[in-house]
Amino acid sequence: MKITHLAVVVASFTLAACASSNGLPTEPVVYSQAEAADSIRIRIGQTIVVEGVKVRFSAVESDSRCPMDAICVWQGDAVAVFVVEQNCDCRTPAFELKLHTTLEPKSGTAYGFKVELRQLSPYPSASSPIKQDAYSAWIRLTPG
């Protein structure tokens, strides 16, 4: 009986570890308005909460930035996708913001906040493609 109980506990811990193996917090990270206005790092797939608004970095739709080890005619552009919604069970719509690193728009507004993409990393290299889960962005949230 004790062995079965121990096996269940070990299996539970193993499943929990696998579920969070991407290193992201399973719960949204809460920031103050002052912290968010300064700029904060958000990893792809991560959700943050600021003053009752949730922002999730959902994807990098495209990344044509000139690789650091190449010579290009122009600097290129990347498009990062953020989903903004209220942090409640109030069934309000979610807004999808597609923000650019070089072109416009570099920012968008939803639920009284302006979300600005400040930087997207890692920077591309011609010799090694970036995996989707390796991206992180520096964003700034201000009343807007």
Image (cartoon, helix red, strand yellow):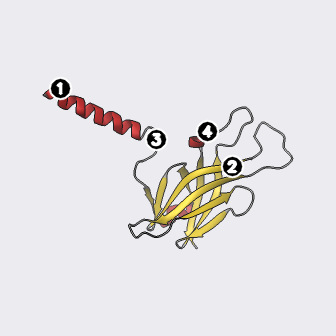
Residue drawn at x 78%, y 36% is 69
Residue 129 relative to residue 139: left or right: right
Residue drawn at x 52%, y 72% is 111
Is the C-beta separation of discs 4 and 2 under 8 Å? no
Q: Earlier in the sequence, mark 3 or mark 4?
A: 3
Residue for badge 1: 3
Image quadrant containing the C terminus: bottom right
Q: Which mark is residue 131?
A: 4
Disc 4 marks a residue whose amino acid type is Lys
Residue for badge 3: 23
Q: Residues within 10 Å of mark 4 (few under 14, many from 20)?
A: few
- Mark 1 or 3: the one toward you: 1
Q: In the depicted view, which residue is nearer to us: 35 or 93? A: 93
Q: Earlier in the sequence, mark 2 or mark 3?
A: 3
- Percent of width and height locating residue 129: 68, 36
- Percent of width and height locating residue 142: 56, 68
Res 5 → quadrant: top left
Residue 30 relative to residue 127: left or right: left
In the depicted structure, whether residue 10 falls above or below residue 115 = above
The CA distance from mark 1 to mark 3 is 30 Å
Q: Residues within 10 Å of mark 2 (few under 14, many from 20)?
A: few
